[in-house]
Image (cartoon, rainbow, N blue to C red):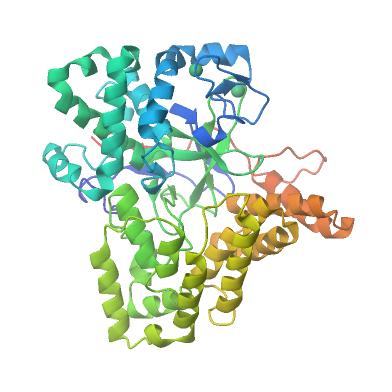
C-alpha cells in the first residue's frame, strides 16, 4: 500500500498502522500510553494535573496553578513539577502576549511546559519519540527559512520565553541549555520539539463534559495517519494514578490490510479549507481519496452548496486564522469562476455579508455581554437561514457560537435548540459513533435539567446518551444482555510500520 497522505519526508517512506485482520466498528484497535501530558491552563482549577480527571483538587502551594486529586499523585508528578513550579509564574507573565490558540489547540504555557518535559526526558535518538513526525526532521536547512515564516512566530516566541525563564530557573531545562554561547542551537532544538508537538500532540477529551482539558503526546498513537474519511477516532481512558491512555477506536468496520487513520482536522469543512488548515497545522498537502474526489469539478460544485461562504469571510471574522495557502484559495476561486458558479451574486452571499456586519459588533465572549451577543448571533442566523443550504458549514459555525454564547447567557431553551440542530447534522457528517455526539447530548441533558423539561422530553436524550456511552465503551452495561459491547483491549493484530 502506498502512502495515503503526502508526508514531509516524501512518498518513499510510509509509516502508520495497518490492521492484519478485520476490526468491527467501535472496536479498540490500539492502546497507547502517554509520553508526556498535562492539564491546560483553563482546566487546571477543575482537573487533576496528572490523571486529568475532574475531581476535588489539592492545589500546589508553590505555583497555585496546578492541583492534584491526591497526595500520592502529587508525589508521582513531583520529579517533573518540582522543576517547573517556580518557573510557572515567570512563564505566564512572558507568554501572556502569545496567542497560541491560533497555532494549535493548546495554550502557550502548556506548550512550554510539555516541551521542557520532553527535553528533560531526553529521548534517545533511536526511540519512537525521536522519530515523531516533524517538518524539520532531517531538514536542518529548512529551519532557517521556517524561522522567518509568520506561522512560526508563536513557537519562536514560546522557545525564547522558555530559554529566558530557564536562565532564572535553571532546573527547568537540562544543563546544556544554559550556555549563552549555544543559545542559537538551543533555540533551534526547542523549536524543533515544539514543531514535533504541533504535529503529534492531541487534545485530551474527558468524559463528563466531552471537552478538551489538556494535551498529551502518545508515541504509537501519533503514528496514526490522517484521512478525510477516517477509519478511527481517538478515545481516552482515564485511570487511577496515571495519565490517560489513548485508544484508537474504529468508527466503521475496518478490513484486514486497511490503515488505522484519524482526522487531524474538522471534517465538516469544505475541501479547500480542510487542505489549507492541514497545511498550517501539520505541514502537508492532503491527497486522500476524499480530497481527490472533492477536488474534481463535480465535487467542488457539491462542496460549494454546503459552504455558502466561499471566500470564508464569515469564518475569518469568527476565528483568527492563519492563511498560509492563500494561493490555493485563489486557485479554487478561479475554478469556481471557470465553472460559472455565480457565488458572488447569490442571495446567500448577500446574507453572508449582512451577517458579517452583525458579527462585527460582537464583543469578546464574556458573561456580561452574553445576552446582547446572543441577540446579534440570532439575528445573523435569521438572515442566513432562508438564504443558505441546510448543510452549510457557515450555519453550523454560527449555531455552535450561539450554543456557547447561550450557555454563558444561561438561555437554556436556545442551548437545547442549537444542540439538537447540531446533533442531527453531526450524525450525517461523522456517523453514529463520534464523540461530538456525546458532547452535544451532554449539553441537551444539562439544558433539560435547567429548564425542568417534562420527563418524556428529557428521556429521549437521556436514552440516546446512555446507549452511545455504552456502545463506545465509556460506560458499563449493567443488564444481563449478552450483546457485544464492542470493547476489546490490547488485542493483537496490528502491524506497526515505523520509519527506518
Ligand atoms: Zn488525579
Ligand atoms: Zn506548583
Ligand atoms: Zn483529505
Seen at 30% across and 29% down, the residue is 161
From this view, report whether residue 106 is shown above or below residue 102: above
Q: 105 left or right of 159? A: right
Along the line of sight, the residue nearer the viewer: 484 or 361: 361
- Asked whether residue 434 is in view, the answer is no
- Asked whether residue 450 is in view, the answer is yes
From this view, report whether residue 203 is shown above or below residue 387: above
Figure quadrant of residue 405: bottom right
Seen at 21% across and 29% down, the residue is 187
Ligand 3: give its quadrant: bottom left
Residue 495 lies, in percent from the top left, at 39, 39
Q: 440 left or right of 268? A: right
Seen at 57% across and 75% down, the residue is 390
Figure quadrant of residue 87: top left
Along the line of sight, the residue nearer the viewer: 274 or 324: 324
Seen at 38% across and 80% down, the residue is 298
Q: Quadrant of the C terminus?
A: top left
Residue 255 lies, in percent from the top left, at 48, 52
Residue 124 lies, in percent from the top left, at 27, 21
Residue 86 lies, in percent from the top left, at 42, 16
Amino acid at each position: 500500500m502506498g502512502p495515503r497522505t503526502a508526508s514531509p519526508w516524501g512518498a518513499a517512506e510510509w509509516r502508520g498502522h495497518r490492521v492484519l485482520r478485520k476490526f468491527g466498528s467501535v472496536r479498540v484497535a490500539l492502546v497507547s500510553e502517554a509520553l508526556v501530558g498535562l492539564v491546560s491552563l483553563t482546566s487546571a482549577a477543575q482537573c487533576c494535573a496528572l490523571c486529568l480527571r475532574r475531581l476535588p483538587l489539592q492545589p500546589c502551594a508553590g505555583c497555585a496553578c496546578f492541583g492534584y486529586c491526591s497526595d500520592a499523585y502529587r508525589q508521582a508528578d513531583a520529579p517533573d513539577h518540582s522543576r517547573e513550579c517556580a518557573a510557572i509564574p515567570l512563564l505566564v507573565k512572558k507568554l501572556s502576549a502569545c496567542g497560541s490558540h491560533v497555532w494549535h489547540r493548546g495554550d502557550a504555557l502548556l506548550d512550554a511546559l510539555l516541551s521542557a518535559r520532553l527535553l528533560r526526558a531526553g529521548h534517545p535518538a533511536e526511540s519512537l519519540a525521536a522519530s515523531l513526525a516533524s517538518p524539520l526532521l532531517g531538514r536542518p536547512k529548512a529551519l532557517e527559512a521556517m524561522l522567518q515564516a509568520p506561522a512560526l512566530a508563536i513557537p519562536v516566541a514560546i522557545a525564547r520565553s522558555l530559554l529566558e525563564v530557564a536562565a532564572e530557573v535553571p532546573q527547568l531545562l537540562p544543563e546544556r541549555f544554559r550556555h549563552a554561547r549555544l543559545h542559537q542551537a538551543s533555540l533551534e532544538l526547542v523549536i524543533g520539539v515544539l514543531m514535533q508537538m504541533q504535529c503529534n500532540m492531541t487534545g485530551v477529551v474527558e468524559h463528563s463534559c466531552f471537552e478538551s482539558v489538556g494535551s498529551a503526546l502518545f508515541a504509537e498513537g501519533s503514528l496514526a495517519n490522517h484521512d478525510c474519511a477516517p477509519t478511527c477516532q481517538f478515545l481516552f481512558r482515564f485511570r487511577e494514578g496515571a495519565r490517560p491512555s489513548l485508544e484508537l477506536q474504529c468508527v466503521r468496520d475496518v478490513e484486514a490490510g486497511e490503515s488505522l487513520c484519524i482526522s487531524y482536522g474538522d471534517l465538516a469543512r469544505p475541501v479547500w479549507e480542510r487542505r489549507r488548515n492541514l497545511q498550517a497545522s501539520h505541514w502537508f498537502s492532503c491527497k486522500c481519496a476524499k480530497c481527490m474526489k472533492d477536488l474534481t469539478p463535480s465535487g467542488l460544485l457539491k462542496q460549494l452548496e454546503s459552504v455558502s461562504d466561499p471566500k470564508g469571510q464569515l469564518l475569518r471574522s469568527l476565528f483568527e486564522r492563519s492563511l498560509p495557502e492563500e494561493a490555493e484559495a485563489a486557485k479554487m476561486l478561479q475554478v469556481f469562476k471557470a465553472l460559472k458558479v455565480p457565488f458572488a451574486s447569490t442571495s446567500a452571499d448577500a446574507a453572508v455579508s449582512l451577517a458579517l456586519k452583525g458579527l462585527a459588533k460582537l464583543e469578546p465572549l464574556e458573561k456580561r455581554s452574553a445576552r446582547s451577543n446572543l441577540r446579534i448571533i440570532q439575528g445573523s442566523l435569521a438572515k442566513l437561514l432562508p438564504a443558505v443550504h441546510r448543510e452549510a458549514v457557515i450555519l453550523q459555525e454560527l449555531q455552535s457560537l450561539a450554543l456557547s454564547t447561550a450557555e454563558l447567557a444561561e438561555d437554556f431553551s436556545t442551548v437545547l435548540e442549537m444542540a439538537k440542530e447540531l446533533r442531527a447534522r453531526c450524525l450525517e457528517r461523522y456517523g453514529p459513533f463520534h464523540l461530538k455526539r456525546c458532547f452535544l447530548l451532554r449539553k441537551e441533558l444539562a439544558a433539560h435539567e435547567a429548564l425542568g423539561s417534562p420527563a418524556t422530553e428529557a428521556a429521549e436524550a437521556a436514552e440516546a446518551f446512555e446507549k452511545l456511552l455504552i456502545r463506545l465503551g465509556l460506560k458499563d452495561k449493567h443488564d444481563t444482555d449478552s450483546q457485544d459491547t464492542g470493547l476489546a483491549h490490547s488485542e493483537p493484530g496490528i502491524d506497526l510500520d515505523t520509519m527506518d
